[in-house]
């Protein structure tokens, strides 16, 4: 299904992106990783993927808040891999503060990574996908792309923006063999969410397990973290023929978060 295709997963040195890259690697796709982290760990991740699955693995350390750097990255990936068949826009950050206290420079950074980078990678990948008559764009939005929470103004605004961009991309690519959908997870226990667990543990003076329970029960009727394996399998499904007519929609894996 995705064997031999090239998949660019932004923000794939950690958490959800890494899980999605592993899921595609297991199916024989070529992988382009992106994100930051310990260079030795990233080298090890590339070597692991290559040795376990035998396909080509690239790595781009591009800072996706920089539009020009994204253009250079996409040119390099096209030169090295021929083009991107499947684009997973996953890189994202969080900042938690009330509107009055929200640092304007944090707003700019969250918007430029969580929303504008999706615009740039998408616009740059479309000519190749159109030339192939096939392509998949998967935007990792969030339950916060559909509903809001306090103190997450930039994140919620960016993720709602990603939902809008997903719909426009779907409309502009209709009948071209390209689809664009969003995956909207609830809580996934990655470094991004661990920070929020730590904050609850400190503020409410409870241990890690109790802090996780508090976080989950506040938003998710189904008190279980979503796993990166579930998200990887969902991304693969969106690339399968079963999803050929599925475009412009949010796929929620949120334990009932947005059902109430
Ligand atoms: P994470 O912190 O584990 O990983 C984030 C990744 O993005 C890392 O690889 C990091 O290096 C990369 N990154 C950060 N800044 C970057 C930049 N400027 N340029 C390029 N790469 C950058 O986070 P995660 O929880 O795996 O989140 C991944 C995505 O999933 C995000 O878009 C997030 O909003 C979304 N999401 C997460 C959850 C959750 O509960 N963890 C829920 C819903 C949606």
Image: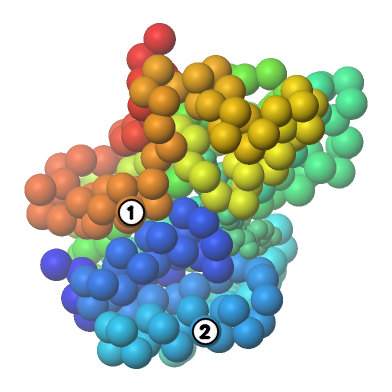
Image disc number at residue 93: none
- The span from disc 2 to disc 1 (Cα, nearest Å) is 20 Å
Q: Find disc 2 in the rendering and name its residue.
A: 44
Q: Position of residue 38 (x, y in %)?
A: 68, 76
247 sits to left or right of 215: left
Q: Which residue is mark 1?
A: 229
**Residue depicted at x 55% and y 18%:** 218
Nearer-the-camera pick, 184 or 229: 229
Report the residue that reaches farthest toward the front.
Answer: 207
Whether residue 158 can be seen here: no
> Badge 2: few (under 14), some or many (20 or more) residues near its Cα, within 10 Å?
few
Q: Is residue 2 visible?
A: yes
Q: Is residue 5 above or below residue 254?
A: below
**Residue 16, position as x, y percentages in the image:** 47, 54
What residue do we see at 48% from left, 42% from top?
Answer: 188
> Is 161 drawn above or below residue 116 in the view shown?
above
- Where's residue 182, x and y in %? 38, 41
Residue drawn at point x = 39 percent, y = 46 percent: 227
Question: In terms of secondary structure, where does tag 2 sit?
Answer: helix
Q: Is mark 2 within 8 Å of ligand 1?
A: no
Task: Pick the quarter of the image with the C terminus.
Answer: top left
Quadrant hosting residue 214? top right
* SS under mark 1: helix
Left or right of 158? Residue 154 is right
Going from N to C along the chain, the mark reached first, 2 or 1, is 2
Mark 1 Cα shell of 10 Å, populated few (<14), some (14-19), many (≥20): some
Is 68 in front, or is 231?
A: 231
Quarter of the image with the N terminus is bottom left
Give the residue drawn at x 39%, y 67%.
21
Between 228 and 223, the one lying in front of the other is 223
Question: Is 135 displayed left or right of 197 in the figure?
Answer: left
Direction top: furthest residue: 260
């Amino acid at each position: 299904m995705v064997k031999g295709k090239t998949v660019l997963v932004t923000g794939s040195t950690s958490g959800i992106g890494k899980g999605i890259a592993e899921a595609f690697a297991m199916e024989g796709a070529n992988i382009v990783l992106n994100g930051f982290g310990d260079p030795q760990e990233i080298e090890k991740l590339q070597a692991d993927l290559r040795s376990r699955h035998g396909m080509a693995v690239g790595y781009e350390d591009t800072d996706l808040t920089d539009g020009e750097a994204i253009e250079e990255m996409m040119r390099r990936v096209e030169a090295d891999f021929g083009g991107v068949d499947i684009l997973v826009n996953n890189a994202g950050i969080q900042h938690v503060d009330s509107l009055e206290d929200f640092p304007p420079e944090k707003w700019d950074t969250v918007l430029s990574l969580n929303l504008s980078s999706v615009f740039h990678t998408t616009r740059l990948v479309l000519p190749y996908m159109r030339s192939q008559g096939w392509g998949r764009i998967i935007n990792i939005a969030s339950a916060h792309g559909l509903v809001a929470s306090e103190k997450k103004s930039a994140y919620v605004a960016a993720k709602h923006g990603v939902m809008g961009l997903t719909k426009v991309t779907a409309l502009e690519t209709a009948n071209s063999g390209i689809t664009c959908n969003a995956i909207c997870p609830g809580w996934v226990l990655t470094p991004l969410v661990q920070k929020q667990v730590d904050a609850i543990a400190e503020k409410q003076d409870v241990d890690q397990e109790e802090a996780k329970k508090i976080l989950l029960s506040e938003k998710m009727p189904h008190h279980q973290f979503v796993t990166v394996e579930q998200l990887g399998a969902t991304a693969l499904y969106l690339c399968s023929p079963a999803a050929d007519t599925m475009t412009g929609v949010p796929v929620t894996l949120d334990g009932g978060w947005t059902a109430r």
